Amino acid sequence: MDRIKNRKTSNRLLLMAIIISIILIAIVLLINGIRTSHAKLLYSQYAGERWGAGDIPYSEISVFYNKDSSITENDIKSVRTKINKKLYEDSFLKDKSDTRVWIDGYSGQTVRNVRKDGTTLEVNVYAVGGDFFLIHPIPLASGSYPDLESPDVNQILLDEYTAWNLFGGNNIAGMKVWIGERIFTVTGVVRVDDAAVSLQAYGNRNSVYVPINALNNNKENEAENVLASCYEAVVPNSIRNYGLNTVAEAVGITFESDEEKDKKRSFLDFGGIEIVENTGRYDVSSLYNRFKNQKYINMKTNDIVYPYWENIARYEEAKGIRTLKVILGLLIIPMITLVCGFIWLFNRRGVAAKPFILLKDKVDTAIEDRKERNYEKLLEAGQEESQPQTGLNESEKEE
């Protein structure tokens, strides 16, 4: 009687654990869905998915430089040549193809005064080039992006704070502003995300975007030229790490082996250049790899200053790691329930043992069949040896 009661009690406990596990798994799926949806709002991190809509997957790679390692437009031309050569060798690029196989963009940052009539503002100036606005499709409040391929480089894109301070509105395309002694035509106004983390990363200064050539053709004062501190490329990634290795090789980065890292005192020292693969950055596997080195995540041994979009991406990455901790904690009970369920099946029903019994029977049958075949081969070999030889070999014939 007691045995029957104990069995009923264990069945009830297992059923309750299963119900709780189902609820926890549903919560995990909900939390992970919210995490994923928040990450996808970071449009600058998903250029690889937007560009690689076909059969070939793409990867977005960002390279950040410190002040001493910043690169010129000639350096960027050299990087492009190396990437083109690699893609051509691997049959991604053809000689006379009109289709663009990959894109890239670059940017540098400086502080300048922008004025209109008697109003002057100190702003962050993002000097951009290449396909910057394809990689960073910043939401527009009005107008359009500057045409970075146009010979007219005196174009400017204002954020909405700058537009309101200078003009009192957003519909200002075609208006003029001054940076130093140069006149720029406003092409449009971009929105500023009012989320707390975005405002923290954006900083206290307003921002404007201009073609990098507009600030770098001042031959009278070359000290004011702006160098690129961020280079980004969206390249094919047909196999794991292909895009990352292609860009790394083009910019002169050599990845160290685990043995080489172990010999160094610190693996956090990246020098004046750092490379990041944005595509897949918020996948569970990527977050888990970051989670393993979380104790070092806030340590930094270089003087690279990240642009605001990278700072937002790193904040979201850290938040994703915290969410992953919660998910792993919630999955403890379902995992224990799964183990207990298997034990219950073995002990009470023998259901879980059936696949293993069938597998054992198959293995035993295969072994017996192999023994029989070997025995038959031995019998055949013995019969051949017992038969008399009817012929003579060459040496016997000579004798």
Image: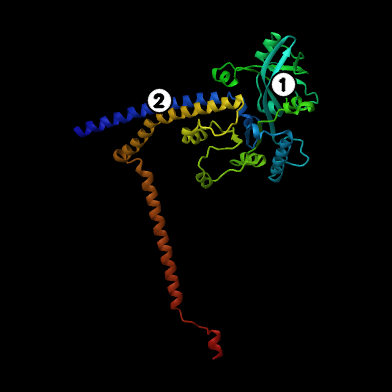
- What is the C-alpha distance between the residues marked 1 and 2? 48 Å
Looking at the picture, which amino acid does disc 2 mark?
Ile
Using the rendered view, name the quadrant where residue 73 is placed: top right
> Of 39 and 78, which appears nearest the observer?
78
Which of the two discs, 1 and 2, labels the residue nearer the N terminus?
Answer: 2
Q: What residue is rendered at 43% in x and 27% in y?
A: 326
- Disc 1 marks which residue? 145
Looking at the picture, which amino acid does disc 1 mark?
Tyr
Mark number displayed over residue 46: none
Give coordinates of residue 94: x percent, y percent. Answer: 74, 42
Asked if 162 appears above or below 63 in the picture, the reply is above
Give coordinates of residue 215: x percent, y percent. Answer: 74, 25
| Viewer can see residue 46 | yes
- Disc 2 marks which residue? 23
Give the position of the C terminus as an image quadrant: bottom right
Q: What residue is rendered at 44% in x and 27% in y?
A: 28
Give coordinates of residue 250: x percent, y percent. Answer: 67, 41
Name the mark nearer the viewer: 1 or 2.
Answer: 1
